[in-house]
Amino acid sequence: MKRLHSDTLIAIALLLIGGVMFWDTFGFRTPPFATVSPRAWPRFLLVLLFGLCAVYLVQSLRAAPAPGAGGGVRAWLSANRNALWCYALFLAFLLTLPYLGILVGGTAFVYAVQAAIGKRDLRSHVKHMVIAVLSVGLMWALFNFALDVMLPTGSLFGDVI
Amino acid sequence: MLQHLGTAFGDVFSVVNLALMALGTAAGLIAGAIPGFTITMAIVLTLPFTFGMTPIHGLSTMLGVFVGGMSGGLMSGILMGIPGTPSSVATTFDGFPMARAGRPGLALGIGVWSSFFGGLFSAVVLALLAPAVAHLGLEFGPWGFFSLIVFALTIAASLSGDNLAKGLIAGVGGMLLATVGEDPINGVARFTFGIDAFEQGFAFLPVLVGLFAFSQIMSDLRDPEAATKVMLDSSAKAVKVEHLAAIKAIFQRWAVLLRSSMIGTFIGVLPAAGGSISNILAWDQAKKASRYPEKFGTGIPDGIIASESANNATAGGALVTMMALGIPGDAVTAVMLGALLIHNIAPSPTFISTQPVLAYGIIVAFFLAHFVMVAEQALALRLFLLVTRVRLYILGAVILAYSAIGVFALNNSVFDIWTLFLFGLLGYGMSRFKFPLTPMILGVVLGPIAEVNLGRALATSDNLGLFVSRPWSLFFIVLAVFSLVYPWYQRGQYTRRWTLLYLPLLLIGVAPALFMMSGTVRPVVGGALLLFACTLLWRRARSGWKLEGAPTGQS
């Protein structure tokens, strides 16, 4: 079976997302005496989106795949390794934020990103840790004391920091 | 006006404000110089620092970053042959060859002073034109504003990439994302899918940082080799900028400077068109008008003057549209608009008349930022050489952490960091699959404004014919239609005969709207455009609808 163009998959995904959103518009409350329904504008945009995605879908079905396209999941993972590491670590940072807070969680995040995509000898690890502590510490101090922003401290370190 | 300017001078020339502007300009110069870091990213990352500042301090800082960023791109463009920002692409055409020929100091000097004069030109235009455009904006009504937004989005889509459909999908997608949360007219919750956090919608700053900064860093870090390398090797030394020789060279070519500044200012005024277009257009026009076009691309001053004066002039033009109409002239002014909204200031046609001190403060700050930029260029060059010795992955990790802290500072909300993450993913996916980001961010900013104006228009009358019978609305609808066709026109300009009809039909299309407007001047302009269109058609018919040859490409 001929491999589907990535643009085709995206067009289909956008059409599905648009369909879900259109279905959701039926659940919007309509206030009494409203001159313009809250559904009107989103539906107008969704109809436009459907039309544009249909054009995009037809274009993608007609177009030949780009040279070098394909290659499977492994090739895709390898090509996007650094970005995936950054996103995964940021997600971990977000999930642990209620417990570790910005200072500890942020330091761990900066260190982990450098360790994941940078050099991995002992000297580099030490350098990465120093950079993480100094950079996040400086930012934390700047926002806390100079800009008076109360940054999350986390439940584990709430009394200490 | 003079009284307000005087008061504004007093506010802008305070010690604190000057210090903040100097910091912002230095940051912009360095950020603009680093390839892969855009001006939009630099301003977006500055925004969290401005929350605790007064509006004039915050805007002066961001204007410093803006002006610095526009000029910073020339440093890496001239020294490394890699433009620091898309606004300096054409600077490399002549700047890099001049540097390689042994005159890097002259090339940098010409770039810096061209930026300076181009920016000053547009600052004067801004001061004179913004109040006049604001006055015009009062005539638009909700129909005109809605059509103007449609025009802005179609231009953004048609200029943003090869595929118009992708640009329009990005724009409409942005407007759709802006509908999540409370409806601005009735206050009804939309697209919450049962998640309480969605009821407040997506805050502008995390969306912006996610789309422009987070995803950009991911794209820069994607290449494992580039991520672990330094940008410049340790043998690169600071260059002495040749100021006097540069100023002399620029004044000898005052026509190039003036023409390019005008092109830049005009491009800036157009909604959604920015420095990335103006520098190349100005370079191209300078080449066409030159007595020695074959020398362009070999390292002549004219090429650098054209590019750098145009890109800085674009900034002033973009500020005209933002301040006078509340419509961003490009992605950068979309951020400025967001900054003003965060400070509870909503630019609109009445902004200049109701908040004159702040409005003129922005103009004065923009003017002053160019002097600061020239003064800091040498320092910025040394700092740039230092920063380029830091490996990209270290810079990236620190900036990601800063982005998270910065967006949290907006509303003290962890949901904003989640928004940053989600839009960072979306922005990365969009750039991987060649969807332009600018139309999306304009959609997010302009979507609610479009909805409110459409609501007002329909509340006044449900007659949709008013969108074509109101003159300004018709004017912008015609422009929107032609901007949708523009990509095909551009592709077929030298090969398809129908393209000979594009400009005449555009002029014939806008003429009726001008005839419908009040007063004498605009109908006379409409008549002149109609006459010009007929002349063009007659001349082309007489020449047998012959196409002109394509220009020779840059070497």
Image (cartoon, rainbow, N blue to C red):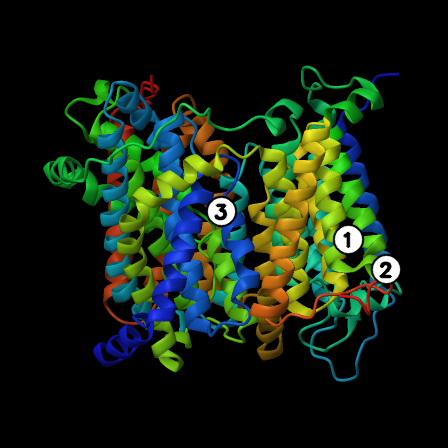
Considering only vertical position in the picture, is B252 above or below B356? above
Q: Is residue A15 left or right of residue B176?
A: right
Q: Nearer the viewer, residue B543 or A90?
A: A90
Q: Chain of mark 3?
A: B
Work out which quarter of the rendered image holds the C terminus of chain B and state it: top left
Work out which quarter of the rendered image holds the N terminus of chain B and state it: bottom left
Residue B485, position in %: x, y? 50, 39
Q: Are marks 2 and 1 in contact (CB under 8 Å)?
A: yes
* Both labels 3 and 2 in a single chain: no
Q: Nearer the viewer, residue B112 or B311?
A: B112
Q: Quadrant of residue B435?
A: top right
Q: Earlier in the sequence, mark 2 or mark 1?
A: 2
* Both labels 1 and 3 in a single chain: no
Asked which secondary structure carries label 2, the reply is helix
Residue underneath mark 2 = A99
Residue A112, position in %: x, y? 76, 40
* Both labels 2 and 1 in a single chain: yes
Residue B110, position in %: x, y? 23, 36
Q: Nearer the viewer, residue B411 or B179?
A: B411
Alpha-carbon span between mark 2 and mark 1: 8 Å
Residue type highlighted by circle 2: Tyr
The numbered mark at residue A105 is: 1
Residue underneath mark 3 = B155
Q: Nearer the viewer, residue B349 or B368?
A: B368
Q: Is residue B243 left or right of residue A59?
A: left
Residue type highlighted by circle 3: Ile
Residue depicted at x 70% and y 50%: B423
Q: Nearer the viewer, mark 1 or mark 3?
A: 1
Q: Chain of mark 2?
A: A
